[in-house]
């Protein structure tokens, strides 16, 4: 029987001609699209930080590092050590880096130093999506999702427990100091008074350090409570001067923190919040906001807050939509957590049709139909909104909300596996969330161009200045 013949396989065979990096990935790959896209973006704020100094080793090209970071977040590999490993093992990363291999510290420092400029790329990519026809602002949905901070909820402590722990640790430190003094006296009696005796036992040092940390956290909580009380009093004084109220004045908030007020020692700006994906559980994290357009699930505004409630985020988010897109959305839908008369009134004054239920609706609960005819005069804002949402058109439009914004959070958290921030502090977390949402829009733009190319059979041009990003967006 004749032996089976296989294709030649010689792993040690040397190449006779130098390979081209552009032949390593199939045409239309996301890596090529990210590379061409970055070439069209304005990276001036990043480039100008390098100056003109020529001493020392030449730095890595910032375009290469931006491409690597954007692609890493787009495929769910945000950690700098993971990125450095992929630059050695992953073909797409090696193509983007032109076979250069910056170490993880270089990647991490570049991200931290230029996080503000990287988050500003969100608007540039959004403008490309608008020019591609992916943003119409006929209907946008606003919502928030809780993302875990780079901190453990077990490292948080309430103000009441801080008081107890402070007293306990102070008593232990005092007892340890007495023991140390007694031991020093014995050593002086045994070895003479020339011994220094100023070495602190490790046990005492640990307790003193923890006591100092707790006292610092207490001072911050007390300062926040005093600031909130002063602000509340100023608002009350202004309202009283403008329109005196009858009856007993409302009691001002206490300048002493609530015993339940908490502060985390690892990321003090994060908060314990109800988890978005597990009812009844809590997470040490941030409340990440996104406004999503219904056309192609493009994110048109982003923000991060340390408040668990979404009610105060509606107006700032809509303002950001107007600035980013220079358009007014026709319909804006939100969940019941965003309802307030101020939000409905402001959105209506801007020319939007707000759809915000005043009451939370249980899953599967039937919505009663609205009575026919003109709405009666004298209805409150909440009553008028309830009536609007009971109409067939109102029910149909509001039912689209979950299909607009919820899949976006699922694609980021489940699809790309991003469930915890890498950076700490509200400002840095905002930059990282903007970077995540930028890469979400990049993937949507890449997918839309490929789909349109497949259906039309023509090459599509999406211009930014004098450059275009369609070169790799073909099959």
Image (tube, helix red, strand yellow):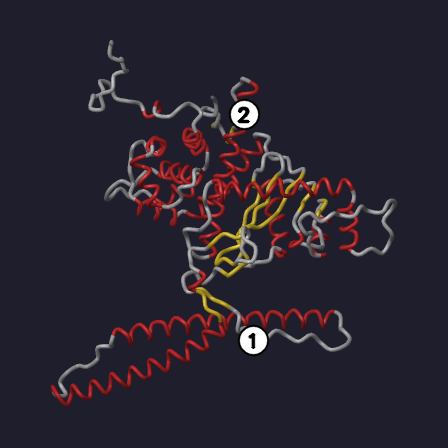
- Whether residue 411 is situated above or below residue 474 in the rendered picture: below
The image quadrant that residue 62 belongs to is: top left
Judge the density around disc 2: few (<14), some (14-19), many (≥20) Cα neighbours within 10 Å. Answer: some
Side of 243 relative to 469 (left or right): right
Image spot of residue 130 (x, y percent): 58, 34
- Residue identifier under label 2: 451
Badge 1 vs badge 2, beta-carbon distance below 8 Å? no
- Whether residue 172 is situated above or below residue 356 in the rendered picture: below
- Whether residue 394 is situated above or below residue 316 in the rendered picture: above
Instruction: Give the residue furthest to the bottom.
Output: 189
The residue shown at (29%, 32%) is 99
Q: CA distance from mark 1 to mark 2?
A: 59 Å
Side of 403 relative to 80 (left or right): right
Q: Nearer the viewer, mark 1 or mark 2?
A: 2
- Whether residue 17 is situated above or below residue 439 in the rendered picture: above
The residue shown at (40%, 24%) is 26
Q: Earlier in the sequence, mark 1 or mark 2?
A: 1
SS class of the residue under badge 2? helix
User: Dividing the image into 4 quarters, which one contains the N terminus?
Assistant: top left
The residue shown at (65%, 50%) is 335
Which label is found at residue 340?
A: none
- Residue identifier under label 1: 255
Judge the density around disc 1: few (<14), some (14-19), many (≥20) Cα neighbours within 10 Å. Answer: some
The residue shown at (34%, 43%) is 82
SS class of the residue under badge 1? loop
The image quadrant that residue 136 belongs to is: top right
Image spot of residue 309 (x, y percent): 60, 58
Image spot of residue 306 (x, y percent): 53, 58
Instruction: Give the residue furthest to the left.
Output: 191
């Amino acid at each position: 029987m004749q032996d089976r013949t296989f294709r030649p396989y010689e792993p040690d065979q040397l190449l006779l001609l130098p390979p081209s990096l552009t032949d390593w990935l199939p045409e239309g790959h996301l890596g090529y699209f990210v590379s061409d896209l970055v070439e069209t973006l304005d990276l001036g704020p990043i480039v100008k930080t390098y100056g003109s100094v020529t001493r020392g080793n030449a730095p890595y090209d910032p375009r290469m590092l931006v491409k690597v970071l954007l692609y890493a977040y787009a495929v769910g590999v945000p950690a700098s050590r993971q990125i450095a490993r992929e630059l050695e093992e992953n073909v797409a990363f090696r193509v983007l880096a032109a076979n250069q291999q910056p170490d993880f510290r270089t990647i991490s420092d570049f991200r931290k130093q230029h996080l503000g400029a990287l988050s500003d790329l969100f608007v540039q990519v959004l403008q490309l999506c608008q020019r591609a026809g992916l943003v119409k602002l006929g209907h946008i949905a606003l919502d928030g999702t809780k993302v875990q901070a780079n901190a453990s909820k077990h490292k948080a402590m309430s103000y009441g427990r801080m008081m107890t722990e402070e007293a306990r640790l102070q008593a232990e430190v005092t007892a340890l100091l007495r023991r140390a003094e007694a031991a020093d006296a014995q050593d002086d009696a045994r070895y003479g008074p020339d011994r220094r005796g100023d070495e602190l036992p490790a046990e005492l040092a640990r307790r003193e350090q923890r006591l100092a940390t707790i006292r610092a956290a207490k001072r911050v909580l007390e300062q926040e409570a005093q600031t909130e009380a002063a602000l509340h009093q100023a608002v009350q004084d202004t309202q009283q001067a403008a329109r005196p109220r009858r009856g007993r004045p409302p009691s001002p908030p206490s300048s002493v923190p609530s015993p339940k007020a908490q502060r985390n020692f690892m990321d003090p700006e994060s908060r314990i919040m109800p988890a978005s994906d597990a009812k009844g559980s809590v997470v040490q994290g941030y409340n990440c906001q996104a406004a999503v357009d219904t056309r192609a699930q493009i994110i048109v505004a982003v923000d991060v807050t340390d408040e668990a409630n979404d009610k105060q985020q509606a107006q700032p988010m809509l303002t950001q939509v107007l600035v980013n897109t220079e358009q007014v959305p026709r319909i804006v839908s939100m969940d019941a957590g965003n309802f307030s008369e101020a939000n409905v009134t402001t959105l209506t004054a801007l020319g939007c049709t707000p759809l915000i239920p005043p009451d939370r609706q249980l899953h599967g609960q039937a919505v009663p139909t609205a009575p026919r005819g003109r709405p009666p005069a004298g209805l409150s804002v909440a009553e008028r909104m309830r009536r609007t949402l009971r109409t067939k058109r109102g029910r149909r439009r509001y039912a689209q909300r979950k299909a607009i914004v919820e899949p976006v959070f699922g694609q980021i958290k489940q699809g790309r596996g991003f469930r915890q921030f890498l950076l700490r502090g509200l400002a840095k977390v905002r930059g990282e969330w903007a970077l995540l949402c930028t890469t979400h829009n990049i993937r949507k733009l890449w997918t839309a161009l490929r789909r349109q190319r497949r259906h039309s059979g023509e090459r599509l041009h999406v211009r930014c200045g004098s450059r275009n990003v369609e070169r790799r967006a073909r099959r």
